[in-house]
Amino acid sequence: MLTGALLILAPLFFGFALALKNRRLMTIIHYSVEALVYFILALLGLGLGQMQGLSSQLGAMAGQVSALVIVLFVANMAGLWLLHRWKPMLSEPRDVARGGAGYLRLFMAALKPLLAVLVGVLSGYFVLPELPQTEQLATWSLMLLLFLIGLQLRNAGLSLRKLLMNTQGLGIALVLVISSLLAGLLLVPLLDMPWNQVLALAFGFGWYSLSGIVIGDSLGPAWGGVAFLNDVLREIIALAIIPLVIGSRPGMAIGYGGATAMDFTLPVIRSNGGLGCVPVAIASGFLLSFLSPVLMGVFLSLG
């Protein structure tokens, strides 16, 4: 399993090692990443739809997702609250004019991954009940996605040194890792599975396209579906709580967004928390995006 984890992680580091200067190529990469994400999510759904006894496992999956979401939410927010008490972060006044319609559009966009998985589930259940290459195709697609994301991270105009020197962003990322680790250990008896697998589930940080396929490839489509739902719900909950929390406790709002703070939830963070929150969100989101596949791969390899 260690070899498989390293093979999945290698494209991320290889992509991060390459510097590109062609803007047109970076634009193509951006749209390719977006298309690949939805393709991978549809494959995840396809694997779920092809799973024997899917209907009988839905109740158990709902309980597992609920446990993950609730325990991680409480642990992450408690850790971020303690960080706020120790080193408070101040936000600028809210930019109300930039909230509204843009926020609603983002919230609706957060439902698109669920639709992609649903299409895959229905296809696997009714149309393609037997497609033996689904798992291999998903794995190769994920490796390509990680390579392209590595390119994006390297060529986003971000200095790794400056990101690591952003103490607030670094602190948020570390608190999220530590609190997720503690939450994972608390979840071991609830989920009734090996501790290393539970910790792998806890380290998705909202990156649902990654966690769903990595966990599904290692633990089966049911757990892949659980990992996906846990992380997509983090994104949806983050969109809901950011406007409520960021005015008084910006670090908590940014931190719960996890890896999405550098991309999907960033516009909501900017419009509600001001420009001062943007470097912190990018720093914490970048670090968590980099750590998520590494931590999942390491803990899954311990099995």
Image (cartoon, rainbow, N blue to C red):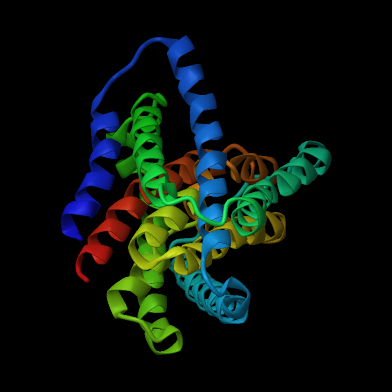
x, y percent for residue 115: 69, 50
The x and y percentages for residue 210 are 43, 50
Residue at the extreme left of the image, as rendered: 3
Q: Residue furthest bottom?
A: 189
| Image: 263 above or below 59 | above
* Residue drawn at the location 29% of the way across and 30% of the way down: 15
Whether residue 159 is visible to the viewer of this picture, yes or no, is yes
- Vertical placement of 214 versus 137: above or below? below
Q: Quadrant of the C terminus?
A: bottom left
Q: Where is residue 181 in the image (x, y as percent from the top left)?
A: 35, 72
Query: Residue 165: horizontal and vertical position, in percent?
Result: 31, 42
Front-most of residues 243 and 287:
287
The residue shown at (47%, 41%) is 282
Location of the N terminus (image quadrant): bottom left
202 and 300: which one is in front?
Answer: 300
Number of labels in the image equals: 0
Regarding residue 175, the answer to whether it shows in the image is no
Q: Residue 144's image quarter?
A: top left
The structure residue drawn at horizontal position 52% and vertical position 57%, both measured from the top left corner, is 251
Q: Is residue 114 left or right of residue 130?
A: right
Who is closer to the viewer here, 110 or 228? 228
